[in-house]
Image (cartoon, rainbow, N blue to C red):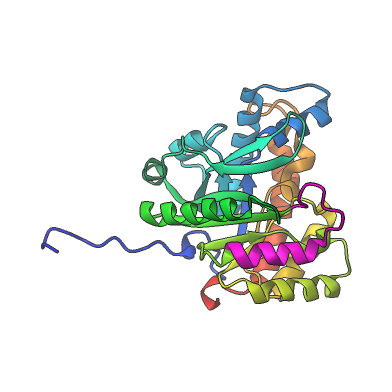
């Protein structure tokens, strides 16, 4: 190494964490699923401009209270980055989602349009990949995709957030959800992403002590810091689910629907004088603040992992 060369330190999860060492992060990377939510709320199919406007409203009103903020490049990442809307860590979604119109995400791959180096220059500190995990003939291919994602993030100087969502294989008669979540976590978190994002076992629909037991079993197989997502959990159940996960060893949450889903379709996003911004301040921000308090009290600091 010459005198003019320097070593850039590897990023740490402090870039996404609260002072407590836990995570209270907001997910705003939904795409066609958000369009479906608008259709359900308004009875109409909305255009891309409406999706982007809602995401930017969430970024402006809720983002400043989040330790990290996740968004996709098609509907708002570049605007959020350019306007400096997020004081916490900015996360870019790099998953190419495969789903039928009106249906759930069935598979993913790495979106080759996302330039990780350019995202870092724009202000991102991390990238996130959703991977649908199934015990089928494509299991190895999906693991290879996840491993490639972790490698690319490291090469670009970004933290890697790997999200595993376990689903039944085609024709699978019996599906043990908690066991599948654990098996997915063991394989995917074993690839050593910076942070693993896990489903809440039992959809959070169980007494808290039961959730603590299941989350403790999940914690045993995850060798890296981990957080929970809110998809599949009723909004009113999510705070207890976060508390249970954190008591069992999780370091917090990265969630969207539990914070802002009931505000989809409120007013005209992005238009001055409409109700969406006040509604986000009055309803979504307190939800996030409550969750952040739970994280601060119960989460395992990421550095203790």
Residue 150 horizontal/vertical position (percent):
47, 56
Task: Identify the residue shown where x is 47% and y is 53%.
Answer: 148
- Residue 249 inside the magenta-drawn segment: no
* Quadrant of the drawing holding the N terminus: bottom left
Q: Where is residue 204 in the image (x, y as percent from the top left)?
A: 82, 61
Per the rendered image, the range of residues in magenta is: 167-188
Q: Which of the 4 image quadrants contains residue 22?
A: bottom right
**Residue at coordinates 52% horizontally, 64% vertically from top-left?**
191
- The foreground one among 215 and 143 is 143
Q: Does the magenta stretch include residue 185?
A: yes
Q: Say which of 99 and 210 sits in front.
A: 99
Q: Looking at the picture, how far across and down is residue 5, in whole percent?
A: 16, 59
Side of 261 where 25 appears, left or right: left
Farthest front residue in view: 137
> How far across and down, in percent of the image, does residue 253 sit?
66, 60
How many badges with numbers are in the image? 0
Residue at image x 54%, y 32%? 74
From the viewer's perspective, is residue 121 above or below residue 165? above
Residue 174, placed above or below residue 257? below
Q: Which residue lies furthest to the left in this view?
A: 3
Question: Which quadrant holds residue 178?
Answer: bottom right
Query: What residue is shown at x 76% (from left), y 70% (from top)?
Result: 244
Quadrant for the C terminus in the image: bottom right
Q: In which quarter of the image is residue 290?
A: bottom right
Q: Can residue 87 be seen in this view?
A: no
Residue 218 seen in this snapshot:
yes
């Amino acid at each position: 190494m010459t005198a003019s060369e320097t070593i850039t330190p590897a990023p740490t999860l402090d870039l996404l964490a609260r002072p407590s060492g836990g995570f209270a992060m907001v997910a705003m990377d939904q795409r066609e699923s958000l369009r479906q939510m608008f259709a359900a709320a308004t009875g109409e199919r909305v255009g891309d401009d409406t999706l982007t406007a809602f995401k930017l409203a969430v970024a402006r009103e809720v983002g400043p209270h989040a330790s990290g903020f996740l968004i996709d490049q098609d509907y708002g990442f570049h605007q959020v980055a350019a306007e400096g809307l997020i004081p916490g860590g900015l996360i870019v979604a790099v998953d190419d989602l495969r789903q039928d119109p009106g249906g759930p995400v069935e598979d993913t791959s790495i979106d080759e349009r996302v330039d990780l180096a350019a995202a870092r220059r724009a202000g991102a500190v991390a990238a996130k990949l959703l991977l649908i995990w199934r015990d089928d003939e494509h299991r190895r291919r999906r693991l290879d995709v996840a491993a490639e994602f972790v490698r690319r993030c490291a090469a670009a100087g970004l933290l890697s957030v790997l999200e595993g969502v376990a689903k039944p294989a085609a024709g699978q008669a019996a599906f043990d959800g908690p066991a599948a979540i654990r098996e997915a976590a063991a394989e995917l978190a074993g690839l050593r992403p910076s942070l693993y994002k896990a489903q809440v076992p039992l959809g959070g629909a169980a007494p808290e002590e039961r959730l603590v037991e299941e989350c403790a079993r999940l914690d045993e197989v995850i060798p890296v810091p981990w957080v929970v997502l809110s998809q599949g959990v009723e909004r009113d159940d999510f705070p207890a689910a976060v508390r249970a996960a954190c008591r069992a060893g999780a370091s917090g949450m990265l969630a969207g629907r539990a914070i802002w889903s009931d505000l989809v379709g409120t007013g005209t996003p992005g238009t001055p004088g409409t109700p969406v911004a006040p509604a986000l301040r009055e309803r979504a921000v307190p939800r996030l603040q409550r969750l952040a308090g739970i994280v601060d009290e119960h989460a395992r600091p990421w550095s203790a992992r």
